[in-house]
Every structure is written in C-alpha cells, then in structure tokens.
Amino acid sequence: MTAPTPRTVAGIGVCPGLVAGPVVHMPEPIAEPAPGLRLSPRDSPAARAESILEASTLVAADLDAAAERATGDSKDLLEATAAIAADPTLVADAQRRVLEDHLVPERAVWEAAEEVAQQFQALGGYFAERVVDIVDIRDRLVAALTGRPRPGVPTWDTPFVLVALDLAPSVTASLDPSKILAIVTDGAGPTSHTAIMANAKGIPAVVAAAGAHALLVDGETALVNGSTGVVVADPTPAELEAVTTAAARARTFSGRGQTRDGHPVQLLANIGDPSEAAPAARAGAEGVGLFRSEFCFLDRELPPTIEEQVTAYRRVFSEFGGRKVVIRTLDSGADKPLHFLVAHDEQNPALGVRGLRTAARSPELLDDQLEAISRAAAAEQAEVWVMAPMVSTVPETEAFVAACTAHGLDTAGVMIEVPSAALLAGPILARAQFASIGTNDLTQYAMAADRLLGSLAELSDPWQPAVLHLIAATCAGGAQQARPVGVCGEAASNPVLAVVLVGLGVSSLSMTPRALADVAEVLSQVDLALCEEVAQLALTAETASDARSMVRSRLPMLAELGL
Ligand code: PEP
Ligand code: MG
C-alpha cells in the first residue's frame, strides 16, 4: 500500500492572515537561449523566420488587449510596450539572423533585442528608461517562440494564491493586493525583501516552504496560514471553515506607544513606496522610522533627478506633518540593486559596495539625494531625520554627518547593521545624532547567514543570543552618549521581542503598520522593570529557542492575546 501524499507544507509565515483560493504558479524566468544555437538541416529558414513575425503579432495583440483593460499610466505603458513588440526593425533584424546566420528564432530575437537595448542605453534619457521594456518584450517573444508560459505575474479571473520558487523584490513590489490572495515561495528567508514587501502590502505570505511549488497544483485550492506558515493543498471543508471563523480579531492602534507604567516607546512605520505613507498614517503610526528611499527607484535605469526625488519625498513628509520621518539614503545592493548604483563585478554582493559604501564611488548621487531631502523637508512640516545604511566605521559616520550638515540636515544618524558598528556604537554616536538598528542585516552579518536563504532561517533569527548582545552593545553606546537608539528591522514587529528590545534600552520601534496594534497592546501590559528583567534573561540564553521560551514564560498575557 502506498503512503498517502502529504497535503501540507510548513514554511515560515511572514505576513499574517488565513486565506484560501486557487493556486497559480509564477512562470519560471526566461533563460538566455544558448549562444550559437542554430537551425537543424531539416528546418526551413524561411518558415522559422516567419515564426518571429507571428510571435511578435501575438505578443503585441496580448499587450494591446491588456492595455484595453488598463487605465492611466499602466495603459500608456502597455501601449508603448506593445508598439515595441510590433516594431518592424526588431522583427526584421531577428529574421535576418535566422535567414543569414541560421540562428534558431529564439536566439535571433535575443541577440536582436540585446542590440536595441545597448543602443537605447547609449542614447540615455527616455530611451535608457525603455531598456526594461525591451527586455520584457524579448522575454515574451522567446516564451511565445518556445511554447513557454508568458513571463511575469500571471493574470487570472479571480484573486489567487501566487506560488513561486522565489520572487524578486521588484516583482513583489508590483503585486496588487486586490488580485493576490497570498504568496507562497519555496525559497526566500523571513527577512528577505520579498518577505518585507509582502508584509508591507498586507499580502498573507509564507516563505521557505520547501516543496510547496511541486505540491500545489494550478487551479486547485490552497489554504495559506501566514501566521503559522502552514500551507494546505486541497483543504477539507472543515479546514476551509477556519477561514471564515478567523475573522477580524484585529486590534487597532492610535495614539502613543508606552509601557504600563508610562515609559514612552515611539511606535513608527516602515514604508517603501510613497503610496504606503497615507495608510501608515491611518494605522496610527507616530511617525516613520524607516523610509526605504531606494524603493522609489527600483526599476530605474538612470538616477532620478533632484526634482523627481523632491516629489517622492514630499508625498511622505506631507502625510506626517509635525511628526518624525526617518528617511534612509539609497540602500542599493545585494537583493535590491539599483541599476544606476550597483557594481556588477562582485562575487559576494552582500559583502560588497552596497549601502553607504556606494557614496565613495558615486558621491554626486548622495549629494543630490541630500539636496532633494533638504528641499522636500523645507517645503513640508515633518520633522525629518536622515540616516545612512550599512555604516561600518567611525570615519564613515563622520563623513555622512558632515555631508548632511552641508545640506542643512542636522538630525543625521546611522543604521547599525554591521557588527563592527554595533561594537563601536559609543564613538559612532559621539558623531551621529541617533542610531537605528537594522536587525535584518545585523542578524545576517552576525550569523554569517544569507537572509535570502530559507534553508538558513534558523540562523537568520534575531532571537539568536549573539544578535541580542550586539543590540545590547548598541544601546549601551547610545546611553553613553545620551543618543536615542531605535530598531527598524523586522524584529521590531514581533510583539514578544519588542518587550526585550525596550528592556535593552531601545526607545523607538519601527515596523510594518499592521504590527503596530499588537506591539502596542503587549507593551501596554508590561512595566519597564519587567522589560528590563526579560531582556537580561534573554541575554543569558545560549540558543535562540531558549531565549524565546524563557521570555515567553515570563509573559503569560501573550496566550490571552493569542500571540
Ligand atoms: C535591516 O537590515 O534590518 C533593515 C531595516 O534594512 P533592509 O531590510 O532594507 O536591509
Ligand atoms: Mg538593511
């Protein structure tokens, strides 16, 4: 007798929510057809060349149909992309490569598109901006020619569960929460930017669900629990019932974060795209603790102008008049490279020229950004703080603070994401006005565990005692210099860990807006002395799971709150 096929996969829940819906797989990205791939002697070059014209007509019609359904900017964009697909020059060049060089059509299209992309890149300006569209068309044509599914996020009649081996942050950023019920990925770590983006968009998500891609079947129902990380294929009626009963037990937050005995803890929002500012303000955030400015420009081939930046930043500042907004300067590199600010020749991009380090190579970009922040701040009422990502040394801090001062930005701080900076927090905070701990990267670098790897999720855990000691060292440096220390990594959105962080001396917690209410609720039920007690307890732990369970055992209210 064969064992029944398991229907369940356990991953890591990164955005809470219990939903059920039809499964749709994300198509595999289109790989480059091998160079020199030629027709076989039996092939008719004329017929194969003709297939390129057919593919281009098909792709253009597909895009035109999508443009018909779209409105505004997306409509314009789809129409422009359809025009590139139908471009006779691109088609003729690809056909020539089939007829004269006997390349297979997909390779011919690839090379022809590559040439156009290079020409557009060299022309700069508007043309360089269109390179992404040429790449999109190239992939669509190759898919049509090789009988593969159309690349990119699939469309479906009803909202669906998107299943992928992995998703790039730029794809996750483009997902529409009204169309995507949930995300399930085999890969991606809990603090990967894919997870962070899903959380920011409020799309229930499970990452590191190894085997989910193979288990789940297109069109069949899947049940996704974004809290526990459990994904069930083809759920039973009883299991589906849970979806309806799990109705909004949602707490809300408005006002001020504080412990039961009135110790203030600022509860702030993390935002990426400026469109997230208004919902964050509505969710009651006391301000913005991390505005990831690079998320405004992820798809850009060329640096944004100062004016464009001013417009983007003002959108955020205007939502938080009279309140604090901490804007982070561009953090390009590793899994969120900005095309215009990335080194292409690095073996280990996470350890390469990323974050503030890019300023040494492109000082004018930092200068322009600080100018834009300064102008946007002057035009709005928000209390604007500026911080640099990936600071590792005291001289880097000094240089950044000086650059900010030169632009009239007096509240300049640093992110503590590298262990060296945590250990030197005292001298660093003698120069900087504040520190914000990026626990996602701090954990990655302390544990030498790539935050993108689901298989290393056990190490990518901010409860790791070594990480807690680095946070304690940062807070000690802050106390020594009487400078505020906040946390803006994902750790801040964990209501249990929040108690530990406050006990270690953190004075603000910045998180996805949805987490504000739970964190506020738990803090309002504990005195500062208890926070300090559990923080010291956690520091005595030798493993992450011990730290977690020791702290939980001192906070019995968690069970009552369902946390
Ligand atoms: C962090 O590293 O914790 C952080 C907040 O920055 P990001 O997640 O964008 O790298
Ligand atoms: Mg970081």
Image (cartoon, rainbow, N blue to C red):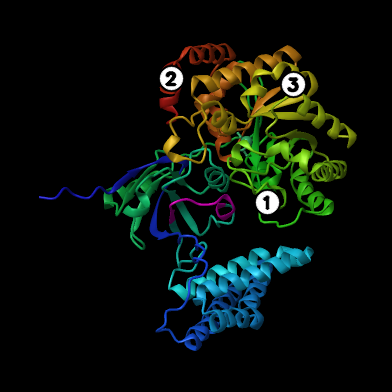
Left or right side of 102 for 511: right
Residue placed under numbered mark 3 in the picture: 428
Nearest to N terminus: mark 1 or mark 3: 1
Residue placed under numbered mark 1 in the picture: 275
Dot 2: element:
loop
Region of the chain picked out in magenta, as a range:
162-172
Left or right side of 25 for 488: right
Q: Pick whichever, 253 or 10, lies toward us.
A: 10
Rendered image: mark on residue 210: none
- State the separation of the CA atoms marked 1 and 2: 39 Å
Question: Was residue 490 drawn as part of the magenta stretch in this picture?
Answer: no
Rendered image: mark on residue 543: 2
Q: Amino acid at mark 3?
A: Ile
Above/below status of 64 relative to 515: below
Q: Residues within 10 Å of mark 1 (few under 14, many from 20)?
A: few
Dot 3: element:
helix
Nearest to N terminus: mark 2 or mark 3: 3
Above/below status of 41 relative to 114: below
Specify the quarter for ligand 1. Answer: top right
Asked whether the beta carbons under mark 1 and mark 3 sit within 8 Å of each other, the answer is no
Query: Could you say where residue 398 lies in the image, as x and y percent from the top left?
Result: 81, 26
- Which picture quadrant has residue 227? top left
Query: Could you say where residue 209 lies in the image, as x and y percent from the top left?
Result: 39, 44
Dot 1: element:
helix
Residue name at image x 46 percent, y 39 percent: 249
- Which picture quadrant has residue 475? top right
